[in-house]
Amino acid sequence: MAPMGIRLSPLGVAVFCLLGLGVLYHLYSGFLAGRFSLFGLGGEPSGGAAGPAAAADAGTVDLREMLAVSVLAAVRGGDEVRRVRESNVLHEKSKGKTREGAEDKMTSGDVLSNRKMFYLLKTAFPSVQINTEEHVDAADQEVILWDHKIPEDILKEVTTPKEVPAESVTVWIDPLDATQEYTEDLRKYVTTMVCVAVNGKPVLGVIHKPFSEYTAWAMVDGGSNVKARSSYNEKTPKIVVSRSHSGMVKQVALQTFGNQSTIIPAGGAGYKVLALLDVPDKSQEKADLYIHVTYIKKWDICAGNAILKALGGHMTTLSGEEISYTGSDGIEGGLLASIRMNHQALVRKLPDLEKTGHK
């Protein structure tokens, strides 16, 4: 019997060759893609756009970027505050009474500034906790994008990124500080403020004055665009206090520092902190100490606390305790703010003021 053989038709040979070429193509193209990706030539995994996503996945935020966005947010909010005030249509209403019995006022300036500031920060840093004085209505949600440009004055002072875990960050926004004075058209007292706290400690502060367009900012262990004055009067100081509680402070201050001390009633916590610094704003009064004797909200004081801390100053309760910017939104123990003075010695001078602050 003749041996049996396998014969392929020309068509079968052609199909077999095509299949072989297909297998080789896929193997070789996969090899090339892998090689290209090592050099950043192949698609999304190594592309420039993957950097921010990777950072977000890692759960960190850059404090230098947060400072840049905070400055922009304070300015954008300030634009709304100024626009509403100049329109003279404030839509003023009361949110209720403060603990001292005064009207807790709100205007369109507060609402519109809050919207701009909150959504700019939230869009840029969606994973961080943001606390703000005014209610955020979901119906008014905006997507306000940041162009990822860091201003030159910040780059000059903060030369490298400073990353921290996003879960450790709390942002405090005051979209319009000194609303009472705003309604009275006392414009010099009005500020917008942003503060960033890490693990409860204030590390970034921005205070913006919408009507003079002056902005002060500082980062603890980073840099600032504002500085302390060259000298302060510790023996017979000028003391800046709340316009609504000046009498309470004046009585104890005169007992503590003598009749030569001066009381400066003023509106807005942001304005009062700036009074302690070297601020190139002709409308800004100068003081040596800032004292507050009653309950105060953290969004009122966090930015000022961060700026003072960055410059070597102090802001504590009247009993000398550091203020934590987590948990509740206010503090009961009043506050004392100073710079280039013996802060604890000042605290020891004010025992009666602490008692007054708890009434």
Image (cartoon, helix red, strand yellow):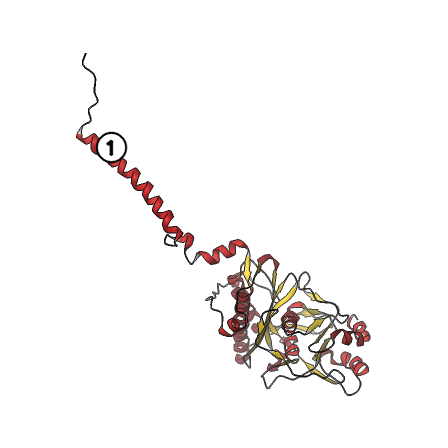
Q: Quadrant of residue 22?
A: top left
Q: Position of residue 123 (x, y in %)?
A: 51, 62
Image height of 341 relative to 148, above or below: below
State the count of labels.
Answer: 1
* Residue drawn at 20 percent across, 34 percent down: 14
Quadrant of the rendering where the N terminus is positioned:
top left
Q: Position of residue 58 (x, y in %)?
A: 53, 54
Quadrant of the rendering where the C terminus is positioned:
bottom right
* Residue drawn at 21 percent across, 20 percent down: 5
Q: As drawn, is 281 to the left or to the right of 241?
A: left
Q: Position of residue 3 (x, y in %)?
A: 20, 16
Callout 1 secondary element? helix
Q: Please name whichever residue, 280 or 128, is drawn nearer the observer in this view of the structure.
A: 280
Q: As drawn, is 151 to the left or to the right of 199?
A: left
Graded by Cα atoms within 10 Å as few (under 14), some (14 to 19) or many (20 or more), the crowding at tag 1 reads few
Find disc 1 in the rendering and name its residue. 16
Q: Please name whichever residue, 325 or 20, is drawn nearer the observer in this view of the structure.
A: 20
Q: Is residue 174 at least partly visible in the picture?
A: no
* Residue drawn at 82 percent across, 82 percent down: 255
Identity, as a three-letter code, of the amino acid under mark 1: Phe
Q: Position of residue 330 (x, y in %)?
A: 69, 66
Image height of 228 relative to 138, above or below: below
Q: Is residue 24 at least partly visible in the picture?
A: yes
Q: Quadrant of residue 335?
A: bottom right
Q: As drawn, is 22 to the left or to the right of 92?
A: left
In the displayed orientation, state which residue is furthest to the top: 1
